[in-house]
Amino acid sequence: MLKTQKNNGNSGNIAIIGQWGLDDDGVFKPDPWVVFHNGVPVQKGFKTVPKGYKTIVAPEGVLLPGLVNAHTHLGLSYLSQPGPGGGVFKFIRAMAAIKKPDIKESIEKAQQAIRFANRWGTFYYCDVSNDAEFSRNLGGLREFSGLRFLEILGYSPPNDDMRLQVAVEALKQDRELHPTVHSPYGSSPKIWKFCANTQESNWVSVHLLEDISENNLGRAQGEAVQFLSDIGQNFIHEISKNSELLPYIEKTGILKRPGKGGTLLVHLNEATDFDIDFLEKKSERGAIVICHRSSRFLGYIRKNWRALEKTNLPVLMGTDSKGTSPDVSMLHEISALLKEGVWKPEFIWKAATSRAYAMFNIKAEEIPCFYFQGATPDLDSLLQHEPVRLPAIDELT
């Protein structure tokens, strides 16, 4: 759930005018303005300011709308990066060897991660956790706004049945939790069907084609199968046996679900042009989420940049966990992706702003505004000027 924060300063009903601002097309333009009613942004534009408002001209700088992080694991904020390369299964094994802190420390670490990202303009998160207690506590944090997913793990029986029972009880206690699968290798077909048909939830967030070995699950070979064998979870399901991955995913019903939300298809590091085309045709209210710094840290080299740019599915951005990314700040994620030079800047900016607002039905009055005083519309400059959250009138000096 989104929390709208009202400024408790001398905001009144005002219009603040900046020097540079980002429009809905992801382009920086001169003379942006935003109108506030009692601290809540209600209207924005460029050039001509509506009449009837007290007008404040901000010093030289950049006006930026809040940024959306479409994939986090804030419950893993206690981790430090265990070492680059080696893929997701090396990371999971390394993570399993680290002692998990108690709930108090987990929440404190998550809060620290959120506060850093919030300071730099991120305001909305899609967080995935397999710990219902953590997720409930996360939802109680003043700093957190967004969607909370309860990840149901368990690839083989009876493990998947037990996890499902725990999830059902957790959902009774917290109606704002969205049950979701982890991945083709992390959750059984029974869990996929449950998440596809659960009426209480409008959203799922799926790790998909993060690693090439996912394609070999139905053939009982590859690194994903070896990982499942190592943890005692290897099981050849009839629904997946000798089946190609994406047709199997379609059969579970996860791509066409009831409700008004959507399906977040996360990573797709190893998706081919054919895979992306298949998902575009078969998905209803689907979106692709890439986590660039995380994928690079794990050693994946993306080859589908052009296909992602051309697809009609909305492309969003996330950061994954602090085990694979230095922070959960979208401004820092955007900076890293811009340096790759693979997409036009406006495509990247829209992935964290207007495209994400539309996907998650975020209203204009729920989107905070940040002013980077002294900055120019350049990422290096923005990252050298920590912003203020408007309408912080007294700080615009």
Image (cartoon, rainbow, N blue to C red):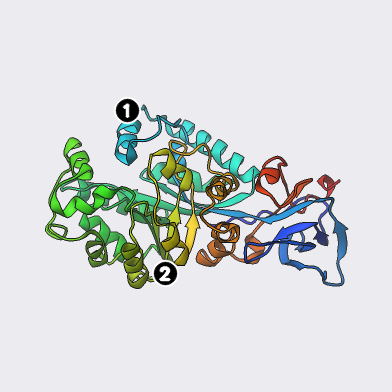
- Residue 58's x, y, as percent? 84, 53
Query: What residue is pinned by disc 1?
Result: 97
Name above or below for residue 363 compared with residue 123: below
Q: Which one is nearer the viewer's eye here, 301 or 163? A: 301
Q: Which one is nearer the viewer's eye here, 13 or 396? A: 396
Task: Indicate left or right for 259 with 194 as reference.
Answer: right
- Residue 353's x, y, as percent? 59, 59
Dot 2 or dot 1, earlier in sequence: 1
One can see residue 186 in this view: no
- Residue 169's x, y, as percent? 32, 51
Badge 2 vs badge 1, beta-carbon distance below 8 Å: no
Per the rendering, the mark at residue 317 is none
Secondary structure of the residue carrying tag 1 is loop
Query: What residue is pinned by disc 2?
Result: 285
Hey, what amino acid is under mark 1? Ala
Secondary structure of the residue carrying tag 2 is loop
